[in-house]
Protein backbone atom coordinates (compact mmCIF):
# COMPACT_ATOMS: atom_id res chain seq x y z
CA UNK A 1 0.00 0.00 0.00
CA UNK A 2 1.27 3.45 -0.89
CA UNK A 3 0.98 5.97 1.94
CA UNK A 4 0.11 9.47 0.71
CA UNK A 5 1.73 12.30 2.66
CA UNK A 6 -0.33 15.43 1.91
CA UNK A 7 0.08 18.92 3.29
CA UNK A 8 -2.72 20.44 5.33
CA UNK A 9 -2.24 23.50 3.13
CA UNK A 10 -3.32 21.58 0.05
CA UNK A 11 -6.91 22.54 -0.77
CA UNK A 12 -7.82 18.97 -1.73
CA UNK A 13 -6.39 17.30 1.37
CA UNK A 14 -9.43 17.64 3.65
CA UNK A 15 -11.84 16.26 1.06
CA UNK A 16 -9.56 13.30 0.19
CA UNK A 17 -9.09 12.46 3.86
CA UNK A 18 -12.83 12.68 4.55
CA UNK A 19 -13.59 10.31 1.66
CA UNK A 20 -11.16 7.75 3.05
CA UNK A 21 -12.75 8.04 6.49
CA UNK A 22 -16.23 7.52 5.00
CA UNK A 23 -14.93 4.39 3.21
CA UNK A 24 -13.76 2.92 6.53
CA UNK A 25 -10.06 3.58 5.99
CA UNK A 26 -7.40 4.97 8.32
CA UNK A 27 -6.00 8.50 8.06
CA UNK A 28 -3.31 9.98 10.30
CA UNK A 29 -4.42 13.44 11.40
CA UNK A 30 -2.63 16.37 13.05
CA UNK A 31 -3.94 17.93 16.26
CA UNK A 32 -2.52 20.46 18.67
CA UNK A 33 -1.51 17.61 21.03
CA UNK A 34 -0.10 14.69 18.97
CA UNK A 35 -0.87 13.09 15.61
CA UNK A 36 -3.80 10.70 15.75
CA UNK A 37 -4.57 7.54 13.80
CA UNK A 38 -8.15 8.26 12.77
CA UNK A 39 -11.12 6.21 11.59
CA UNK A 40 -14.91 6.45 11.60
CA UNK A 41 -15.66 6.11 15.31
CA UNK A 42 -19.14 4.71 14.61
CA UNK A 43 -17.91 1.97 12.25
CA UNK A 44 -16.74 -1.16 14.15
CA UNK A 45 -14.81 -2.49 11.15
CA UNK A 46 -12.94 0.81 10.74
CA UNK A 47 -12.22 1.00 14.47
CA UNK A 48 -10.83 -2.55 14.38
CA UNK A 49 -8.25 -1.34 11.84
CA UNK A 50 -6.94 1.15 14.41
CA UNK A 51 -6.29 -1.57 16.96
CA UNK A 52 -4.61 -3.76 14.32
CA UNK A 53 -2.40 -1.00 12.91
CA UNK A 54 -1.21 0.12 16.35
CA UNK A 55 -1.05 -3.31 18.00
CA UNK A 56 -3.28 -1.78 20.64
CA UNK A 57 -4.92 -3.85 23.43
CA UNK A 58 -8.67 -4.18 22.91
CA UNK A 59 -9.48 -3.00 26.45
CA UNK A 60 -7.85 0.40 25.87
CA UNK A 61 -10.65 2.92 25.04
CA UNK A 62 -10.43 5.36 22.13
CA UNK A 63 -11.21 9.08 22.05
CA UNK A 64 -13.95 10.37 19.75
CA UNK A 65 -13.00 13.63 18.05
CA UNK A 66 -15.82 16.00 17.09
CA UNK A 67 -15.92 19.19 15.01
CA UNK A 68 -18.05 21.28 17.35
CA UNK A 69 -19.04 21.23 21.01
CA UNK A 70 -22.70 20.93 20.00
CA UNK A 71 -21.93 17.47 18.56
CA UNK A 72 -21.29 16.20 22.09
CA UNK A 73 -25.03 15.66 22.52
CA UNK A 74 -25.13 13.31 19.50
CA UNK A 75 -22.93 10.75 21.22
CA UNK A 76 -23.36 11.36 24.96
CA UNK A 77 -26.30 11.48 27.36
CA UNK A 78 -26.84 12.76 30.92
CA UNK A 79 -24.30 15.48 30.20
CA UNK A 80 -23.60 17.49 33.38
CA UNK A 81 -23.41 21.28 33.48
CA UNK A 82 -19.68 20.96 34.18
CA UNK A 83 -19.14 19.48 30.70
CA UNK A 84 -20.77 22.46 29.01
CA UNK A 85 -18.75 24.86 31.15
CA UNK A 86 -15.50 23.08 30.32
CA UNK A 87 -16.36 22.95 26.61
CA UNK A 88 -17.07 26.68 26.57
CA UNK A 89 -13.77 27.39 28.31
CA UNK A 90 -11.39 24.92 26.65
CA UNK A 91 -12.86 23.67 23.33
CA UNK A 92 -11.49 23.56 20.74
CA UNK A 93 -8.47 22.52 22.78
CA UNK A 94 -6.43 19.79 24.49
CA UNK A 95 -9.18 18.56 26.84
CA UNK A 96 -11.00 15.22 26.70
CA UNK A 97 -14.13 14.53 28.76
CA UNK A 98 -15.42 11.08 29.72
CA UNK A 99 -19.23 11.03 29.61
CA UNK A 100 -22.04 8.46 29.46
CA UNK A 101 -22.19 7.09 25.90
CA UNK A 102 -25.29 6.82 23.74
CA UNK A 103 -25.99 3.47 22.05
CA UNK A 104 -24.87 4.91 18.71
CA UNK A 105 -21.25 4.62 19.90
CA UNK A 106 -20.04 1.03 19.35
CA UNK A 107 -18.56 -0.92 22.23
CA UNK A 108 -15.33 -1.47 20.32
CA UNK A 109 -14.73 2.30 20.50
CA UNK A 110 -15.41 2.46 24.24
CA UNK A 111 -13.61 -0.84 25.05
CA UNK A 112 -16.93 -2.24 26.25
CA UNK A 113 -17.62 0.59 28.69
CA UNK A 114 -20.83 2.59 29.10
CA UNK A 115 -18.81 5.80 28.83
CA UNK A 116 -16.98 7.46 25.95
CA UNK A 117 -14.02 9.84 25.87
CA UNK A 118 -14.71 12.81 23.62
CA UNK A 119 -12.94 16.01 22.57
CA UNK A 120 -12.93 18.83 20.03
CA UNK A 121 -9.36 19.34 18.76
CA UNK A 122 -7.84 22.77 18.19
CA UNK A 123 -6.76 22.00 14.62
CA UNK A 124 -8.79 23.48 11.79
CA UNK A 125 -7.86 20.91 9.13
CA UNK A 126 -8.87 18.01 11.38
CA UNK A 127 -12.18 19.62 12.38
CA UNK A 128 -12.86 20.24 8.67
CA UNK A 129 -12.19 16.57 7.88
CA UNK A 130 -14.62 15.56 10.64
CA UNK A 131 -17.28 17.91 9.22
CA UNK A 132 -16.81 16.62 5.68
CA UNK A 133 -16.83 12.98 6.77
CA UNK A 134 -20.04 13.54 8.75
CA UNK A 135 -18.93 11.20 11.55
CA UNK A 136 -16.88 11.52 14.74
CA UNK A 137 -13.33 10.30 14.25
CA UNK A 138 -11.87 7.85 16.76
CA UNK A 139 -8.17 8.69 16.94
CA UNK A 140 -5.62 7.46 19.44
CA UNK A 141 -2.04 8.69 19.07
CA UNK A 142 -0.57 7.46 15.78
CA UNK A 143 2.45 5.68 17.25
CA UNK A 144 2.88 1.93 17.47
CA UNK A 145 1.29 0.96 20.80
CA UNK A 146 3.65 1.46 23.72
CA UNK A 147 6.14 3.55 21.75
CA UNK A 148 6.70 7.32 22.02
CA UNK A 149 3.84 9.34 20.57
CA UNK A 150 4.01 11.03 17.18
CA UNK A 151 4.32 14.82 17.08
CA UNK A 152 5.28 15.23 13.40
CA UNK A 153 4.07 13.67 10.16
CA UNK A 154 7.52 12.13 9.71
CA UNK A 155 7.10 10.28 13.01
CA UNK A 156 3.86 8.79 11.66
CA UNK A 157 5.49 7.90 8.35
CA UNK A 158 8.26 6.09 10.24
CA UNK A 159 5.72 3.94 12.09
CA UNK A 160 3.08 3.38 9.38
CA UNK A 161 4.52 3.86 5.90
CA UNK A 162 2.92 1.29 3.61
CA UNK A 163 0.35 0.35 6.28
CA UNK A 164 -2.17 3.21 6.02
CA UNK A 165 -3.40 5.08 2.94
CA UNK A 166 -2.86 8.69 4.03
CA UNK A 167 -1.11 11.06 6.42
CA UNK A 168 -2.14 14.72 6.71
CA UNK A 169 0.95 16.83 7.41
CA UNK A 170 0.00 19.74 9.65
CA UNK A 171 3.52 20.45 10.90
CA UNK A 172 4.85 19.89 14.43
CA UNK A 173 2.22 19.63 17.16
CA UNK A 174 1.99 22.76 19.28
CA UNK A 175 1.27 21.18 22.69
CA UNK A 176 3.20 17.95 22.22
CA UNK A 177 1.57 15.62 24.77
CA UNK A 178 -1.83 13.98 24.63
CA UNK A 179 -4.91 15.80 25.91
CA UNK A 180 -5.89 16.20 29.53
CA UNK A 181 -8.65 13.70 30.36
CA UNK A 182 -11.32 14.44 32.99
CA UNK A 183 -14.00 11.91 33.94
CA UNK A 184 -17.41 13.55 34.42
CA UNK A 185 -19.45 10.34 34.48
CA UNK A 186 -19.45 10.03 38.29
CA UNK A 187 -20.55 12.37 41.07
CA UNK A 188 -17.15 14.02 41.37
CA UNK A 189 -14.81 15.07 38.54
CA UNK A 190 -11.68 12.92 38.32
CA UNK A 191 -8.43 13.65 36.48
CA UNK A 192 -7.50 10.51 34.54
CA UNK A 193 -4.59 11.90 32.53
CA UNK A 194 -2.75 15.24 32.86
CA UNK A 195 -2.00 17.34 29.79
CA UNK A 196 -1.95 20.89 28.49
CA UNK A 197 -4.97 21.89 30.59
CA UNK A 198 -3.75 21.87 34.19
CA UNK A 199 -5.55 20.63 37.32
CA UNK A 200 -5.72 24.22 38.57
CA UNK A 201 -7.47 25.33 35.38
CA UNK A 202 -9.99 22.51 35.72
CA UNK A 203 -10.73 23.30 39.37
CA UNK A 204 -11.37 26.94 38.46
CA UNK A 205 -14.27 25.71 36.29
CA UNK A 206 -15.62 22.61 38.07
CA UNK A 207 -14.68 23.54 41.65
CA UNK A 208 -13.62 20.03 42.60
CA UNK A 209 -11.20 17.42 41.27
CA UNK A 210 -9.96 13.99 42.30
CA UNK A 211 -6.52 12.91 41.09
CA UNK A 212 -6.72 9.33 39.81
CA UNK A 213 -4.08 6.87 40.97
CA UNK A 214 -3.05 6.28 37.34
CA UNK A 215 -1.60 9.81 37.13
CA UNK A 216 1.28 9.04 39.50
CA UNK A 217 1.33 5.25 39.90
CA UNK A 218 1.16 2.11 37.80
CA UNK A 219 -2.22 0.44 37.38
CA UNK A 220 -2.89 -3.28 37.72
CA UNK A 221 -3.08 -5.21 34.44
CA UNK A 222 -6.59 -6.46 35.21
CA UNK A 223 -7.93 -3.01 36.10
CA UNK A 224 -10.83 -1.54 34.08
CA UNK A 225 -9.92 1.97 32.89
CA UNK A 226 -12.11 4.67 31.36
CA UNK A 227 -9.57 6.42 29.18
CA UNK A 228 -6.43 5.86 27.09
CA UNK A 229 -2.97 6.01 28.61
CA UNK A 230 -3.96 4.87 32.09
CA UNK A 231 -3.04 1.22 32.20
CA UNK A 232 -0.35 -0.05 29.90
CA UNK A 233 3.29 0.93 29.57
CA UNK A 234 3.40 3.85 27.15
CA UNK A 235 5.74 6.21 25.36
CA UNK A 236 8.77 3.94 25.88
CA UNK A 237 11.79 3.81 23.57
CA UNK A 238 13.46 0.45 22.88
CA UNK A 239 16.10 1.06 25.57
CA UNK A 240 15.70 1.12 29.35
CA UNK A 241 14.66 4.45 30.88
CA UNK A 242 15.34 5.40 34.49
CA UNK A 243 14.08 8.70 35.92
CA UNK A 244 16.73 10.31 38.15
CA UNK A 245 15.46 12.90 40.66
CA UNK A 246 17.35 15.27 42.94
CA UNK A 247 19.61 18.23 42.18
CA UNK A 248 21.56 18.20 38.94
CA UNK A 249 24.79 17.88 40.93
CA UNK A 250 23.51 14.83 42.81
CA UNK A 251 22.10 13.36 39.59
CA UNK A 252 25.47 13.83 37.85
CA UNK A 253 27.23 12.06 40.73
CA UNK A 254 24.79 9.15 40.53
CA UNK A 255 25.22 8.85 36.76
CA UNK A 256 29.02 8.92 37.05
CA UNK A 257 28.77 5.93 39.38
CA UNK A 258 26.36 3.98 37.10
CA UNK A 259 27.25 5.15 33.60
CA UNK A 260 28.24 2.55 31.01
CA UNK A 261 29.40 3.15 27.44
CA UNK A 262 26.35 3.55 25.21
CA UNK A 263 24.14 5.10 27.89
CA UNK A 264 22.48 8.49 27.35
CA UNK A 265 21.09 11.32 29.48
CA UNK A 266 17.77 13.07 28.75
CA UNK A 267 17.87 16.42 30.51
CA UNK A 268 16.84 20.08 30.51
CA UNK A 269 18.65 22.63 28.34
CA UNK A 270 19.95 24.29 31.50
CA UNK A 271 21.73 21.02 32.41
CA UNK A 272 23.54 20.31 29.13
CA UNK A 273 26.87 21.55 30.47
CA UNK A 274 26.54 19.51 33.68
CA UNK A 275 25.90 16.28 31.75
CA UNK A 276 28.24 17.03 28.82
CA UNK A 277 30.25 13.84 29.41
CA UNK A 278 27.18 11.58 29.13
CA UNK A 279 25.87 12.20 25.58
CA UNK A 280 23.05 14.46 26.82
CA UNK A 281 19.90 15.21 24.85
CA UNK A 282 17.79 18.18 25.99
CA UNK A 283 14.04 18.10 25.47
CA UNK A 284 13.25 21.64 26.63
CA UNK A 285 13.93 24.20 29.32
CA UNK A 286 13.19 23.41 32.95
CA UNK A 287 11.98 27.01 33.27
CA UNK A 288 9.55 26.57 30.34
CA UNK A 289 7.05 23.73 30.83
CA UNK A 290 5.53 24.30 27.37
CA UNK A 291 8.90 23.57 25.78
CA UNK A 292 9.23 20.35 27.79
CA UNK A 293 5.82 19.12 26.65
CA UNK A 294 6.51 20.05 23.02
CA UNK A 295 9.95 18.41 22.97
CA UNK A 296 9.49 15.27 25.06
CA UNK A 297 8.20 12.78 22.50
CA UNK A 298 10.57 13.90 19.75
CA UNK A 299 13.43 13.29 22.18
CA UNK A 300 12.10 9.88 23.26
CA UNK A 301 11.77 8.87 19.61
CA UNK A 302 15.38 9.93 18.97
CA UNK A 303 16.35 7.63 21.85
CA UNK A 304 14.26 4.76 20.47
CA UNK A 305 17.29 2.61 19.73
CA UNK A 306 17.92 -0.84 21.19
CA UNK A 307 21.67 -0.19 20.91
CA UNK A 308 21.40 2.39 23.67
CA UNK A 309 21.86 0.78 27.07
CA UNK A 310 20.10 3.01 29.59
CA UNK A 311 18.66 6.50 29.35
CA UNK A 312 18.90 8.47 32.59
CA UNK A 313 16.02 10.95 32.38
CA UNK A 314 15.45 14.15 34.33
CA UNK A 315 11.89 15.23 35.09
CA UNK A 316 10.50 18.62 36.14
CA UNK A 317 8.92 19.47 39.49
CA UNK A 318 5.44 20.96 39.72
CA UNK A 319 1.71 20.32 39.66
CA UNK A 320 0.77 22.28 36.51
CA UNK A 321 1.88 21.35 33.00
CA UNK A 322 4.93 19.73 34.58
CA UNK A 323 2.57 17.03 35.87
CA UNK A 324 1.88 15.95 32.28
CA UNK A 325 5.61 15.65 31.57
CA UNK A 326 6.15 13.71 34.81
CA UNK A 327 3.32 11.35 33.89
CA UNK A 328 4.68 10.57 30.40
CA UNK A 329 8.26 10.14 31.60
CA UNK A 330 7.25 7.85 34.45
CA UNK A 331 5.21 5.67 32.07
CA UNK A 332 8.09 5.59 29.61
CA UNK A 333 10.31 4.38 32.45
CA UNK A 334 7.78 1.86 33.73
CA UNK A 335 7.79 3.94 36.93
CA UNK A 336 11.48 3.14 37.60
CA UNK A 337 12.83 6.08 39.61
CA UNK A 338 16.07 6.70 41.45
CA UNK A 339 16.43 9.48 44.02
CA UNK A 340 20.01 10.66 43.52
CA UNK A 341 20.22 12.13 46.98
CA UNK A 342 18.63 11.16 50.28
CA UNK A 343 15.73 13.13 51.67
CA UNK A 344 16.80 16.16 53.61
CA UNK A 345 16.27 16.69 57.30
CA UNK A 346 12.61 16.28 58.29
CA UNK A 347 11.43 18.66 61.01
CA UNK A 348 8.19 18.41 62.93
CA UNK A 349 6.85 21.89 63.75
CA UNK A 350 4.17 22.27 66.40
CA UNK A 351 2.79 24.62 69.04
CA UNK A 352 -0.42 26.37 69.97
CA UNK A 353 -2.35 28.72 67.72
CA UNK A 354 -1.03 32.29 67.60
CA UNK A 355 2.52 31.36 68.60
CA UNK A 356 4.10 32.32 65.27
CA UNK A 357 4.50 29.09 63.29
CA UNK A 358 3.74 30.97 60.06
CA UNK A 359 6.76 33.22 60.56
CA UNK A 360 8.98 30.23 61.24
CA UNK A 361 7.75 28.33 58.17
CA UNK A 362 8.29 31.35 55.91
CA UNK A 363 11.86 31.56 57.18
CA UNK A 364 12.25 27.84 56.52
CA UNK A 365 11.05 28.26 52.94
CA UNK A 366 13.48 31.17 52.47
CA UNK A 367 16.28 28.69 53.17
CA UNK A 368 14.99 26.33 50.47
CA UNK A 369 12.88 24.12 52.71
CA UNK A 370 9.73 22.25 51.67
CA UNK A 371 6.66 22.66 53.92
CA UNK A 372 3.77 20.22 54.39
CA UNK A 373 0.91 21.95 56.25
CA UNK A 374 -1.19 19.18 57.81
CA UNK A 375 -4.20 21.43 58.28
CA UNK A 376 -4.20 22.11 54.54
CA UNK A 377 -3.68 18.41 53.85
CA UNK A 378 -6.78 17.58 55.91
CA UNK A 379 -8.98 20.10 54.10
CA UNK A 380 -7.72 18.98 50.70
CA UNK A 381 -8.54 15.38 51.61
CA UNK A 382 -12.09 16.44 52.43
CA UNK A 383 -12.36 18.26 49.11
CA UNK A 384 -10.61 15.92 46.68
CA UNK A 385 -10.99 12.38 47.99
CA UNK A 386 -13.90 10.17 48.97
CA UNK A 387 -11.97 7.81 51.26
CA UNK A 388 -11.89 10.15 54.28
CA UNK A 389 -15.52 11.20 53.83
CA UNK A 390 -16.58 7.55 53.48
CA UNK A 391 -14.81 6.68 56.73
CA UNK A 392 -16.42 9.58 58.58
CA UNK A 393 -19.87 8.75 57.24
CA UNK A 394 -19.46 5.07 58.18
CA UNK A 395 -18.70 6.01 61.81
CA UNK A 396 -21.00 9.05 62.00
CA UNK A 397 -24.00 8.40 59.71
CA UNK A 398 -25.69 11.52 58.37
CA UNK A 399 -22.65 13.78 58.79
CA UNK A 400 -21.76 13.72 55.10
CA UNK A 401 -24.25 15.50 52.85
CA UNK A 402 -23.60 14.31 49.33
CA UNK A 403 -19.87 14.94 49.07
CA UNK A 404 -19.60 17.63 51.76
CA UNK A 405 -18.93 17.27 55.45
CA UNK A 406 -21.59 18.74 57.74
CA UNK A 407 -19.12 20.17 60.25
CA UNK A 408 -21.77 21.58 62.59
CA UNK A 409 -23.56 18.25 62.90
CA UNK A 410 -20.31 16.36 63.40
CA UNK A 411 -19.15 18.83 66.05
CA UNK A 412 -22.42 18.43 67.91
CA UNK A 413 -21.71 14.71 68.20
CA UNK A 414 -18.02 14.51 69.01
CA UNK A 415 -17.61 17.46 71.39
CA UNK A 416 -20.06 15.92 73.83
CA UNK A 417 -18.70 12.38 73.58
CA UNK A 418 -15.00 11.67 74.34
CA UNK A 419 -15.22 8.23 72.71
CA UNK A 420 -16.71 9.69 69.52
CA UNK A 421 -14.02 12.39 69.44
CA UNK A 422 -11.32 9.75 69.83
CA UNK A 423 -12.82 7.77 66.94
CA UNK A 424 -12.93 10.86 64.74
CA UNK A 425 -9.31 11.69 65.57
CA UNK A 426 -8.25 8.14 64.73
CA UNK A 427 -9.91 8.45 61.31
CA UNK A 428 -8.55 11.89 60.46
CA UNK A 429 -5.08 11.35 61.90
CA UNK A 430 -4.66 8.14 59.95
CA UNK A 431 -5.79 9.73 56.68
CA UNK A 432 -3.54 12.78 57.11
CA UNK A 433 -0.49 10.67 58.01
CA UNK A 434 -1.01 8.43 54.99
CA UNK A 435 -1.27 11.42 52.67
CA UNK A 436 1.79 13.12 54.19
CA UNK A 437 3.78 9.90 53.67
CA UNK A 438 2.65 9.82 50.04
CA UNK A 439 3.72 13.43 49.53
CA UNK A 440 7.11 12.89 51.16
CA UNK A 441 7.83 10.18 48.58
CA UNK A 442 7.41 12.73 45.79
CA UNK A 443 9.58 15.50 47.27
CA UNK A 444 12.92 15.68 45.44
CA UNK A 445 15.91 14.49 47.40
CA UNK A 446 18.06 16.90 49.36
CA UNK A 447 15.33 19.33 50.39
CA UNK A 448 14.87 19.88 54.13
CA UNK A 449 11.22 19.26 54.98
CA UNK A 450 8.97 20.73 57.67
CA UNK A 451 5.77 18.97 58.75
CA UNK A 452 3.51 21.59 60.35
CA UNK A 453 0.94 20.01 62.70
CA UNK A 454 -0.62 20.97 66.02
CA UNK A 455 -1.38 17.25 66.46
CA UNK A 456 2.18 16.27 65.60
CA UNK A 457 2.41 13.64 68.35
CA UNK A 458 -1.19 12.46 68.72
CA UNK A 459 -1.43 12.17 64.93
CA UNK A 460 1.61 9.88 64.70
CA UNK A 461 3.48 12.37 62.53
CA UNK A 462 6.37 12.88 64.95
CA UNK A 463 7.69 9.42 64.09
CA UNK A 464 8.28 10.65 60.52
CA UNK A 465 10.54 13.45 61.79
CA UNK A 466 14.26 13.61 62.55
CA UNK A 467 13.74 16.58 64.87
CA UNK A 468 10.69 18.12 66.56
CA UNK A 469 10.42 21.84 67.28
CA UNK A 470 7.88 23.62 69.49
CA UNK A 471 7.00 27.28 69.01
CA UNK A 472 5.87 29.09 72.14
CA UNK A 473 4.88 32.68 72.92
CA UNK A 474 3.53 34.69 75.87
CA UNK A 475 -0.25 34.36 76.19
CA UNK A 476 -0.86 38.09 75.81
CA UNK A 477 1.05 38.12 72.51
CA UNK A 478 -0.93 35.13 71.22
CA UNK A 479 -4.20 36.86 72.08
CA UNK A 480 -3.18 40.01 70.19
CA UNK A 481 -2.19 37.99 67.12
CA UNK A 482 -5.44 36.02 67.06
CA UNK A 483 -7.55 39.18 67.43
CA UNK A 484 -5.69 40.87 64.57
CA UNK A 485 -5.51 37.80 62.33
CA UNK A 486 -9.03 36.40 62.72
CA UNK A 487 -11.00 39.53 63.72
CA UNK A 488 -12.30 37.90 66.90
CA UNK A 489 -12.82 39.17 70.42
CA UNK A 490 -10.36 38.78 73.26
CA UNK A 491 -12.68 36.26 74.92
CA UNK A 492 -12.86 34.15 71.75
CA UNK A 493 -9.08 34.25 71.41
CA UNK A 494 -8.64 33.02 74.97
CA UNK A 495 -11.18 30.24 74.40
CA UNK A 496 -9.19 29.02 71.41
CA UNK A 497 -5.96 29.03 73.38
CA UNK A 498 -7.45 27.20 76.39
CA UNK A 499 -9.04 24.57 74.12
CA UNK A 500 -5.54 23.45 73.06
CA UNK A 501 -2.78 21.67 74.92
CA UNK A 502 -0.77 23.81 77.36
CA UNK A 503 2.69 25.12 76.58
CA UNK A 504 4.21 22.62 79.02
CA UNK A 505 3.01 19.76 76.81
CA UNK A 506 4.94 21.02 73.79
CA UNK A 507 8.03 21.83 75.83
CA UNK A 508 8.08 18.33 77.27
CA UNK A 509 7.53 16.54 73.98
CA UNK A 510 9.78 18.41 71.55
CA UNK A 511 13.53 18.25 70.96
CA UNK A 512 13.81 22.04 70.60
CA UNK A 513 11.77 25.04 71.76
CA UNK A 514 11.77 28.42 70.03
CA UNK A 515 10.15 31.21 72.04
CA UNK A 516 8.54 34.03 70.09
CA UNK A 517 8.90 36.81 72.63
CA UNK A 518 10.17 39.72 70.51
CA UNK A 519 9.26 41.61 67.38
CA UNK A 520 8.31 39.71 64.22
CA UNK A 521 11.66 40.59 62.64
CA UNK A 522 13.56 39.44 65.74
CA UNK A 523 11.71 36.12 65.71
CA UNK A 524 12.36 35.67 61.99
CA UNK A 525 16.10 36.18 62.55
CA UNK A 526 15.96 33.74 65.47
CA UNK A 527 14.34 31.16 63.21
CA UNK A 528 16.91 31.62 60.43
CA UNK A 529 19.79 31.29 62.89
CA UNK A 530 18.20 28.18 64.40
CA UNK A 531 17.80 26.50 61.00
CA UNK A 532 21.34 27.35 59.91
CA UNK A 533 22.75 25.85 63.08
CA UNK A 534 20.46 22.82 63.00
CA UNK A 535 21.26 21.95 59.38
CA UNK A 536 24.99 22.25 60.03
CA UNK A 537 24.68 19.99 63.09
CA UNK A 538 22.77 17.35 61.13
CA UNK A 539 25.38 17.34 58.36
CA UNK A 540 28.21 16.42 60.75
CA UNK A 541 29.17 12.72 60.73
Image: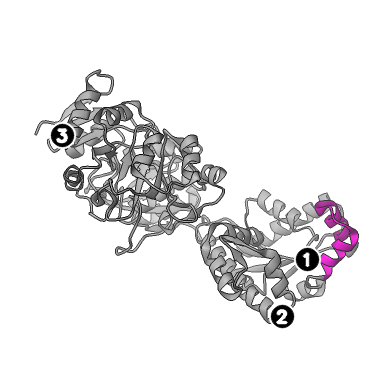
- Residue at 71% across, 52% down: 363
Task: Compute the Cα span from label 2 to label 3.
Answer: 72 Å
- Find out whether the residues at labels 2 and 1 contact each other: C-beta distance under 8 Å: no
Residue 191 on image: x %, y % = 45, 51
Residue pointed to by mark 2: 418
Residue sitting nearer the eye, 430 or 343? 430
- Find out whether the residues at labels 1 and 3 contact each other: C-beta distance under 8 Å: no
Task: Compute the Cα span from label 2 to label 1.
Answer: 21 Å
Residue 197 on image: x %, y % = 47, 41
Rendering quarter of residue 430: bottom right
Rendering quarter of residue 296: top left
Q: Earlier in the sequence, mark 2 or mark 3?
A: 3
Task: Compute the Cα span from label 1 to label 3.
Answer: 72 Å
Instruction: Report crowding for label 2: few under 14, some 14 to 19, many 20 or more residues within 10 A (C-alpha).
Output: few
Q: Which mark is residue 458?
A: none
Question: Looking at the image, is 375 positioned above or below residue 459?
Answer: above
Rendering quarter of residue 461: bottom right
Residue pointed to by mark 3: 23
Secondary element at tag 2: helix
- Residue at 36% across, 43% down: 118
Q: Is residue 124 left or right of residue 461?
A: left
- Residue at 86% across, 55% down: 483
- Find out whether the residues at labels 2 and 3 contact each other: C-beta distance under 8 Å: no
Question: What span is colored magenta in the figure?
Answer: 478-498
Q: Which mark is residue 352?
A: 1
Instruction: Report crowding for label 1: few under 14, some 14 to 19, many 20 or more residues within 10 A (C-alpha).
Output: many
Amino acid sequence: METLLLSAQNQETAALAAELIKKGELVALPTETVYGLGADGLNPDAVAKIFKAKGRPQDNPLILHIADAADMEKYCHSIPDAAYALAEKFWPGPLTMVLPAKDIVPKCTTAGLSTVAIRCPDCEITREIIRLAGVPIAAPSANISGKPSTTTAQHVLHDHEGKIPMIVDGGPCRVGVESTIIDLSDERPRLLRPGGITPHQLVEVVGDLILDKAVTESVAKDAVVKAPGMKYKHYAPACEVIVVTGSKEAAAKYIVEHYQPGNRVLCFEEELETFAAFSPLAYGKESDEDSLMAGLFAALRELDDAKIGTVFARRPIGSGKALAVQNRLMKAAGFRTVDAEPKGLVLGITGGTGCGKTTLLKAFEEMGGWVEDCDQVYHQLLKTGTTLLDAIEARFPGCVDGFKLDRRKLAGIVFNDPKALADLNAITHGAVKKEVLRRLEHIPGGYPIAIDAIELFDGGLAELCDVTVAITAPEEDRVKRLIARDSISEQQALERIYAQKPESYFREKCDYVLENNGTPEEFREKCLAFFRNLLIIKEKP
